[in-house]
Amino acid sequence: MLVDIQSWGETLRLLVELAGTAAFAVSGLLEGARKKLDAVGVCVVAFLTAFGGGTLRDLLLDRRPFFWVEHVELLWGVMALCVLAMLFLRQHHFEVTEKAIQWPDALGLGLFTATGVHLALDAQMPMLVAVLMGLTTGVFGGVLRDMVCNEVPTAFRDHRPYAVCAFAGGWVYVGLGLLDTPGWLALVACVTVTAGLRLMALWRNWALPAWRV
């Protein structure tokens, strides 16, 4: 195992999971509001975005119970967040744009990538599998969000790097683990690199080449 779970501590890992869940929940409810869904639709999109990636991760790693079953407070938190956010948006007539969704989405991508890599390493998975598990955890919630909202997923249609950022951040985590770097530092570096690369790609409008036949 490259990174001992004790180097994080269970509390810190849960805080990272909580922050990632909240960030993706916000991106999901903003997308639902932008699509002018009703209250139920907004909540469904928020829940799918917040819990989709972590649930797939737990399935692939055969972790039971799922993280949102083990920590049911996450469900209550997302539910409360949805209610408060919808009241705020209605009261202040806040116009939701695609740009507003990109900030919490980038943060959630970084946080969930880090947790995915960490849990895969803790389960004794090979390095490449751990990186791909982090990528899957970070990307899948957004894919579900876009599919439910009848959009081609951002991870596939947006030529600005998305999954590539998670892939790079995952290798940063693994590389620092090989150097016996403290777990908290590997976590911060993974989140910073993943979210930072995504935000830089949005700011500088970096683009991957389109597929040409």
Image: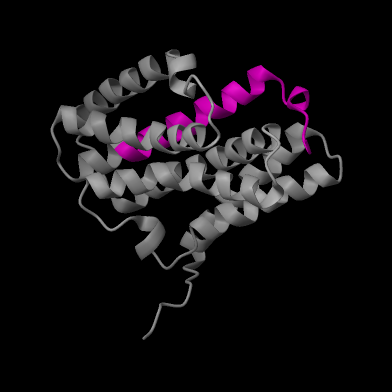
Q: Of residues 135 and 66, which is closer to you in this image? A: 66
Quarter occupied by the C terminus: bottom left
Q: In this view, does 24 lie above or below 83?
A: below
Left or right: residue 138 versus residue 51 is: right
* Colour mapping: one colour
Residue stretch rendered in magenta on the structure: 1-28
Residue 138 lies, in percent from the top left, at 50, 44
| Image quadrant assignment for residue 144 | top left
Which residue sits furthest front?
Answer: 62
Q: In this view, does 12 lie above or below 213?
A: above
Q: Can residue 62 be seen in this view?
A: yes
Which residue sits furthest bottom?
Answer: 213
The majority secondary structure of the magenta stretch comes to helix
Residue 104 lies, in percent from the top left, at 44, 41
* Residue 107 part of the magenta segment: no
* Residue at figure coordinates x 64%, y 17% from the top left: 11
Residue 183 lies, in percent from the top left, at 76, 33
| Image quadrant assignment for residue 123 | top right
Left or right: residue 43 versus residue 193 is: left
Residue 39 lies, in percent from the top left, at 16, 28
Quarter occupied by the N terminus: top right
Q: Can residue 106 be seen in this view?
A: no
* Residue at figure coordinates x 67%, y 41% from the top left: 125
Q: Of residues 116 and 81, which is closer to you in this image? A: 116
Left or right: residue 99 versus residue 63 is: left
Left or right: residue 4 versus residue 140 is: right
* Residue at figure coordinates x 63%, y 33% from the top left: 119
* Residue at figure coordinates x 41%, y 37% from the top left: 24
* Residue 2 part of the magenta segment: yes
